[in-house]
Image (cartoon, coloured by chain):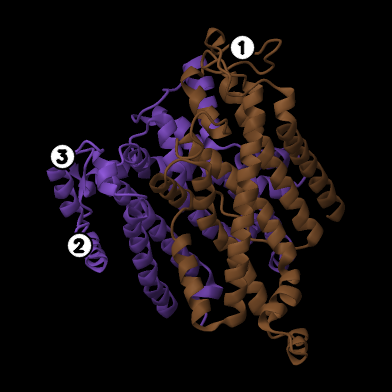
Chain colours: A brown, B purple
Amino acid sequence: MRARGLGAVAAGAAVLLLLALAGAVAPLLVPDPYATDLAARLAAPHAGHALGQDSLGRDVLARVLHGARISLAVGTAVVALSLLVGVTLGAAAGYLGGWFDEAVARVIDVLLAFPGLLLAIALAAVLGPSLGNVVLALSLLGWTGYARLARAEVAALRQREFVQAAQALGAGPGRIVARHLLPLAAPILLVQATFGMAGAIVAESSLSFLGLGAPPPLASWGAMIDEGRPFLLVAPHVVVWPGIALAATVLALQLVGDGLRDLLDVRSPRQRVVTN
Amino acid sequence: MTGSLGARRLVLLVPTLLGVVTLVFAFLHLVPGDPVEIMLGESAAPADVAALRRDLGLDRPLPAQYARFLLRAARGDLGQSIAFRTSVARAVAGRYPATLELAGAAFVLALGLALPLGVAAALRPGSAVDRIARLASLAGACLPGFWLGPLLILLFSLRLGWLPVSGRGGLAHLVLPATTLGLGMLAVLVRLVRASMIGALGEDYVRSARAKGAPERRVIAVHALRNALLPVTTVAGLQAGALLAGAIITETIFAWPGLGRLLVQAIDARDYPLVQGCVLAIGLTYVGVNTATDLLHRAIDPRLRDAR
């Protein structure tokens, strides 16, 4: 089990690293992703444009690589914000109990009473299309999963002897939670964060596909797939490549998450599937 | 039936429903700027702006707006759709059956494939069937509907000409949208049925049944499968709710005249009352499906049924 976990993490991490690296050095490798060339609209892959050109003659490879920057940045930002808010609220609820715990639990219940994507769509619709709003909308929904995990772990560990020992030594609640309890919850949160990043990346693409995420001309994979749809028959490459990049990213994150779960030996509730 | 626990579950529904309605109410107030001006455009006549503001109740204090929204929502009155020039309730009701049809077809397809595939994979781990099952669950987890859908259209509609590109009609119109929508659920269920079945086959009661000389078919179908299906029921219910959200994208791809497409149209038209109506309808259905799943789980699991 452990050996398989290690292999999966290594394979997934390698793909993600490659993607991040390609995204980082994209400006040096490929043409300007926004440079249009109307004479070469929908050109099939050829020398100079390895993955072909889109409906405005923009280089598909350049746009796919810039899409990696958007996907990874949005995914990282959403996970970081959700973790910060979710762990803080969840740990406080689990440690303090009482009305605060009850209030946090009710808010989570209501947010989970909607399908995640529906709320993200509604929020993005009222906030307006921008990447910042996508991060905001997805984080407003994404924190609940981490909060539930942090709350459960902290509540379960709160009565243990080492906590009482720390209290007897004069440690305050903040220090006990941060130094003694949260490190024990870290493995399960890490696994959840990996699946959460996959979910956030798919959600960003879904919103951009619907025109509610990255505004044009940004090269979000979801937006590229949407823009290429009318030309599916004559220029399938415009739709195919961003989809392959997206599927590879999600697969890599799944592999890392599954592998980490085996390695760290945690039982994690899977992140709700946001799309399909 | 499920006694006091079931009743308690229904009581807990009240704050959830109230929260859902409150959140939908809040949407209009999350709009940056004046929602009325955004809906009508900057060139609208002041009289029209004032009329719509009165119609939406935005001229009253916030608590009064909230009370009005709750009372009207309880009666199924969600105001007027600006873009469709009809009541929101009527617009939503008109599209509801199409979404149910699509989600229902996707559900049947996913469950109908996941059960035999998952069981067969569990009976022979490592076999060809097992590998197919694992591939299916991997594909479903990684291929987003908004990519799979267009590719299916390209292959089966545009290239092969076997199935219609879009729209709602007979069974042929359902195949591609239901496949696109159901694949994600299929992925989750295949994985779960397989794992749950492998777990059940290793239980003592299965060994006892075999020791007593029960035929293998009966051991699999009655002793193992029935127990393995308990977690599957819960997850299938949760996934059925998630299909409603996935339908928003699937309906957009296939021009399927359901709630999801209506929601996207309402967003494009900045028809906020209609957006609220669609979100509320999908949200309430989701809550209903999840509650029904929970009650069903309690009803079929003797350990929960007889608890307390």
- Amino acid, disc 3: Ala
The extreme right residue here reads A3
Is the residue at mark 1 from the same chain as the one at mark 2? no
Residue A110: name its quadrant.
Answer: bottom left
Q: Are marks 3 and 2 in contact (CB under 8 Å)?
A: no
Estimate how packed mark 3 is, as few (under 14), some (14 to 19) or many (20 or more) residues with alpha carbons within 10 Å: few
Could you say which is closer to the camera, residue B89 or residue A101? A101
Could you say which is closer to the camera, residue B305 or residue B105? B105
Q: Report the disc number at residue A44.
A: 1
- Amino acid, disc 1: Ala
Q: Which residue is mark 2?
A: B60
Residue drawn 45% across the image and 35% down it: A211
- Amino acid, disc 2: Arg
Estimate how packed mark 1 is, as few (under 14), some (14 to 19) or many (20 or more) residues with alpha carbons within 10 Å: some
Residue drawn 41% across the image and 27% down it: B172
Can residue B1 be seen in this snapshot? no
Q: Are marks 1 and 3 in contact (CB under 8 Å)?
A: no
Residue A2 in picture, x, y percent from top left: 85, 55
Q: Is residue A151 above or below residue A166?
A: above
Which is in the foreground here, disc 1 or disc 2? 2
Separation of disc 1 and disc 2 at Cα? 59 Å
For residue B4, side relative to residue A65 (left or right): left
Which is in the foreground here, disc 3 or disc 2? 3
Estimate how packed mark 2 is, as few (under 14), some (14 to 19) or many (20 or more) residues with alpha carbons within 10 Å: few
The chain letter under disc 2 is B
